[in-house]
Amino acid sequence: MNSETTYLRSYTLKKEQIPPVISEDIDDYERESLKKKIKELLDQQEAVIVSHYYTDSDLQILADETGGCVSDSLDMARFGNQSSAKTLIVCGVRFMGETAKILNPEKRILMPDMDANCSLDLGCPEDEFSKFCDENPEHVVVVYANTSAAVKARADWMVTSGSAVDVINYLKKKNKKIIWAPDKYLGEYVQKKSGAEMLIWQGSCIVHEEFKGKELASLRKNHPDAKVLVHPESPSSVIEQADMVGSTTEIIKAFGDMNAKKFIVATDKGIFHKMKELANNKIIMEAPTAGKGATCTSCAHCPWMAMNSLKKLLHVLKTGENEIFVEDQIISSAKNSIEKLLKFTSNNQSIGLANDA
Ligand code: SF4
């Protein structure tokens, strides 16, 4: 295998950079009242909700009820791009709002909470990343979707967890050396699958990083009939035990397709809403994290995704606050790396590499 992994400094966030997980506490009456008002404003403003699987189930239900979308980051981007709505309300984290703006500069993009960020995005500052790319000019720069607009603008390709292995395999066939950022676990997984020569940025997702290989092995011993579904942002000790490794969409699909009754799932538990909708008769167990009494990073739920709520959604529809803006110059460069992936996934790898490096 012709491979190389250079380890850079670790991009672990400080405790004070990670907010607590806070869920909106509302009763059924208030929930219905909020939903009714939101629906009226969505109609009036020709707006749709584009929501990630990790958000609160109230938002996912509302998105489905109002002709919006609940999906992973790639399909959120696709949906927003194809929608005729004038306003997209992106319920997710900051980079998802920016991606929506990059692909739809003419549309108004609102987000329920502008502080909803992502440890991968925060762990890949554009200035440091750009400097690193400049020092390795012979490499094609491939970044994960979970990055800022400015980092995407510096990249040749943007990929998602569901497309990363295919894109890297494609580049490897072209004998390209690769800079990968920012998730080290996904990068290591892709590198193992492809054998590509990769320089891997050392960021991580604070949610998936908490899944524990040893504890997962014990749980599997107690439930030998359970299938293990793992998101590739998890550590390799967890990935190694998986029956299936994939993106959130692929995990949901595998859960529906696999002929098993029990599943152990290593990803944010917000996804359980869609899984239960698909097959309510199947049993879902959370993959073990650091355990009870630990910090918010051990609860298998993203504190930034949890910032999205019905109350905040209504507030932005009423006020027009929290609009996402991205500089024109960044939009035009970042669009190139995102659209390359959209074409790659829809054209089944038929595009050329003329502008890759
Ligand atoms: S779950 Fe992890 S990767 Fe996803 S938004 Fe939260 S911190 Fe980022």
Image (cartoon, grey):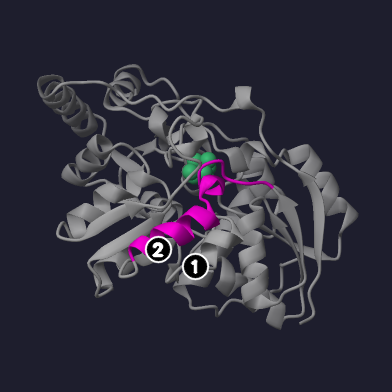
- Residue 125 locus on image (x, y percent): 72, 38
Query: Can see residue 255?
Result: yes
Residue identifier under label 2:
220
Does 205 appear in magenta? yes
Determine which quarter of the picture holds residue 200.
Answer: bottom right
Helix, strand or loop at disc 2? Answer: helix
Bin the neighbour count of mark 2 within 10 Å (Cα to Cα): few under 14, some 14-19, many 20 and up.
Answer: some
Q: Is residue 75 covered in magenta?
A: no
Question: Which quadrant of the structure image shows residue 138?
Answer: bottom right
Indicate whether 319 appears above or below 104: above
Position in image of residue 102 (x %, y %): 53, 45
Which residue is depicted at the point 20% across and 42% down? 61
Label 1 belongs to which residue? 241
What is the magenta range? 203-223
Q: Looking at the image, tell me whether mark 1 or mark 2 is earlier in sequence order.
A: 2
In the rendered structure, which amino acid carries the disc numbered 1? Gln
Identify residue type, mark 2. Arg
Q: Quadrant of the C terminus?
A: bottom right
- Give the distance between the C-alpha atoms of the residues marked 1 and 2, in whole angstroms: 9 Å
Marks 2 and 1: in contact by CB < 8 Å?
yes
Nearer to the camera, 82 or 130: 130
Instruction: Say whether residue 101 is visible.
Output: no
Give the residue at x 27% y 36%.
Answer: 59
